[in-house]
Amino acid sequence: MKRFWIGRQDWDHTFFVHYRIPTELLHLHVPDELTIEEFDGSAWISIVAFEANDNVLRLASGLSVLPSFLELDVRTYVKYKGERGMIFLTMDANSLTAIKGARWLTSLPYYESYMNIRTHKEGCDFTSIRKGKKKDRAVFTGSTSSQSESYPAVQDPITEFLMERYALFTTIKGDIYRGPIEHAGWEVMDAEIEIFNNSLFDFISGFEPSEPIVHLAKSQRTAFHPFEPVQQSQSTD
């Protein structure tokens, strides 16, 4: 039976900053039911930033269009019963409407942030400052520049591992849920980034980021399907 998407958006001016990370540092942040996936001997964690345009929600009353907004995610790579996917550790956006809707529907770890993007021929400059108490204010500022022509992510093993993910896992009231993601295969450019501030990883004790792998992508239309429970917690009397 064909499934219908519940949300659709275009990811524009997207960049990915990928770091190796010791697997043991992620255990506190990933549910035990999910297997942290490794490539080339280590787990990986990525910063993903984009401008979300043409945002459409499919509601019972019809289609609803949301204004454009910016988003900045931290994700890592997992498997559930052999299926590759990802799990978001933090998600920042500058749209309170999008944040409230996502929290209500999925309990994804969204935070409201002040954000700005300035695009240029080679890439973009991106700033994010999380709102809230000073001790909780994660900050990221960086400037990207492309270093290659665009190519399909599937052509390179590590790029395919990091980019070609079509399932999002999360927990809702202790249960594991899977959200299918639909989009074309990624076309990416190798890139460089100059990072001026980054406290996005401060919640991971002991993590010291090394030199990252960086990719840019121009645009990608993405559709989200309803989350489905894949493992429910055992309740006790």
Image: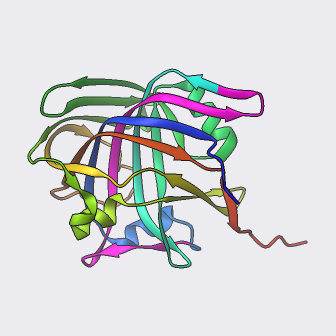
Instruction: Please give the name of the residue rendered at 51% of the width and 20% of the height, measured from the top-left corner.
Output: 67
Query: How many callouts does the rendering have?
Result: 0
Is 44 situated left or right of 10 in this image?
left
Query: Observer-nearest residue: 213 or 42?
Result: 213
Query: Observer-nearest residue: 126 or 174?
Result: 126
Determine whether 64 is above or below 157 in the image. above
Instruction: Please give the name of the residue rendered at 46% of the width and 32% of the height, measured from the top-left corner.
Output: 93
Determine whether 77 is above or below 119 in the image. below
> Could you say which quadrant of the image residue 217 lies in?
top left
Q: Which residues are magenta?
A: 34-63
Is 101 situated left or right of 79 in this image?
right
Instruction: Please give the name of the residue rendered at 38% of the width and 67% of the height, measured from the top-left corner.
Output: 25
The picture places residue 34, in percent across and down from the top left corner, at: 54, 72
Q: Is residue 117 magenta?
A: no
The picture places residue 156, in percent across and down from the top left corner, at: 21, 66
User: In the rendered image, which quarter contains the C terminus?
Assistant: bottom right
Is 65 situated left or right of 46 in this image?
right
Instruction: Please give the name of the residue rendered at 23% of the width and 57% of the height, measured from the top-left corner.
Output: 209
> Does residue 36 appear in this view?
yes
Determine whether 51 is above or below 88 in the image. above
Query: Observer-nearest residue: 168 or 62?
Result: 62
Furthest-right residue in view? 237
> Does residue 206 appear in this view?
no
Furthest-left residue in view? 147
> Could you say which quadrant of the image residue 57 lies in?
top right
User: In the rendered image, which quarter contains the N terminus?
Assistant: bottom right
The picture places residue 51, in percent across and down from the top left corner, at: 37, 31
